[in-house]
Amino acid sequence: MAGSGEHFKALVRSHASGNDEAFYSVALQVAAQAARRGHHNLATDLKTAVESSRAGSPAKVTSIAQPRGELSELVVASHPTVSLKELVAPGHLGEQIKRVLTEQRQSKRLLDHGFEPVHRLLLEGPPGTGKTMTASVLAHELSLPLLTIRLDSIMSKFMGETASKIRQVFEAAEIQRGIYLFDEFDALGGDRTGNDVGEARRILNSFLVFLENSSSESIIVAATNHRSILDKALFRRFDMVLDYDLPDPKQAAAVMRGRLGSIAKGVRWSALSEFVDGLSHADLVRAAEDAAKTAILTGNSSVGTDELRSALQSRRTASIG
Ligand SMILES: Nc1ncnc2c1ncn2[C@@H]1O[C@H](COP(=O)(O)OP(=O)(O)OP(=O)(O)O)[C@@H](O)[C@H]1O
Ligand SMILES: [Mg+2]
């Protein structure tokens, strides 16, 4: 129990110096350790006590979500406001996301029975199909901060120190509950950044060890659009793999309708089916915005089918060629 002794000393020191935040952080570390050892009731009680003490000082609650010191170079914190209903997803994907939310919301029940809620997610699919948006949705729906880690920039900036930087992020995830998004995860899967392959492999292996030991307090999300270069064995290390794809015409219409709202009242969506082929959700949002702006600038109060069609055609030329 050497770890507990150190924790106890740190608690006394932070109390003596009047540093509330340090005190709460250590208390949460003790809670995380208790959870790892299977003492889930103790872990939950401790966390509740910390949360209710902090509730008395709201300013501090927000400040801890802002990574400080070295961590601020690695992680960008945000508080997204995107809700689940804004995300257009096919049935299975939608079910998976709801499942993550349910397990996290009811994590205490699961932990009490010796099961961990899903918390290691791999998101893969083409650009602009909702991977980053999903991380935002999870953060918003669970009222947690989103902490984004750009692996490619860590790898190019810190080179030899990448593994230790990733360890710092995982340590933070133990203390500060949140959604930790490792974007550009494929930077670890191959030699795309110009890094030495052996080095990338070592970093990937340490990531997997941290992932394996991560507690279910925080959700670790790895996002990539290069499934093919990722190792098959890697997929087994995640609790859930979520596949993203380009939208079908119905989903495409839902994306545009979602962005335009009542301004798109009279649109004949079925007439647009053939123009959405090959476009991502992100392309469709942009096309819808272009069409809306054209309509407004020409003095109209609603968007017509023709404006949308030509906006879609320009998007297609821009993104598909
Ligand atoms: N499934 C979706 N439903 C509704 N809107 C979407 C969806 N996917 C993407 N969008 C829109 O496109 C924008 C960009 O999507 P997002 O950043 O999530 O893509 P991504 O999959 O992370 O792409 P990349 O691989 O390039 O990082 C979103 O902010 C949103 O406006
Ligand atoms: Mg993204």
Image (cartoon, grey):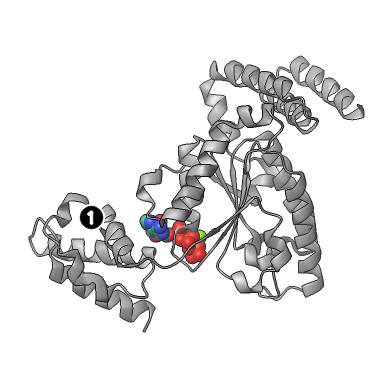
Residue placed at 32% from the left, 81% from the top?
317
**In-image side of 196 versus 48 (left or right):** right
The answer to whether residue 19 of the structure is visible from this angle is: no
Q: Please state the horizontal and vertical placement of residue 143, each as a whole percent of the image.
A: 49, 34
Quadrant, the N terminus: top right
- Residue 34: image quadrant is top right
Q: Residue at horizontal 25%, vertical 63%?
A: 288
| Residue at the farthest left position | 299
Q: Read off the residue under disc 1.
A: 260
Q: Residue at x 75, y 55 (%)?
A: 208
Q: Position of residue 228 (x, y in %)?
A: 62, 74
Q: What's the residue at 47%, 54% (across, down)?
A: 93
Residue 26, picture quadrant: top right
- Describe residue 56's horizontal placement relative to residue 248 as left or right: right
Give SS at disc 1: helix
Q: Does residue 282 appear to the left or right of 306 in the view shown?
A: right
Q: Quadrant of the C terminus?
A: bottom left
Res. 35 visible in picture: yes
Snapshot quadrant of residue 37: top right
Tell which of 293 and 306 is nearer to you.
306
Residue 72: x and y in percent read 63, 46
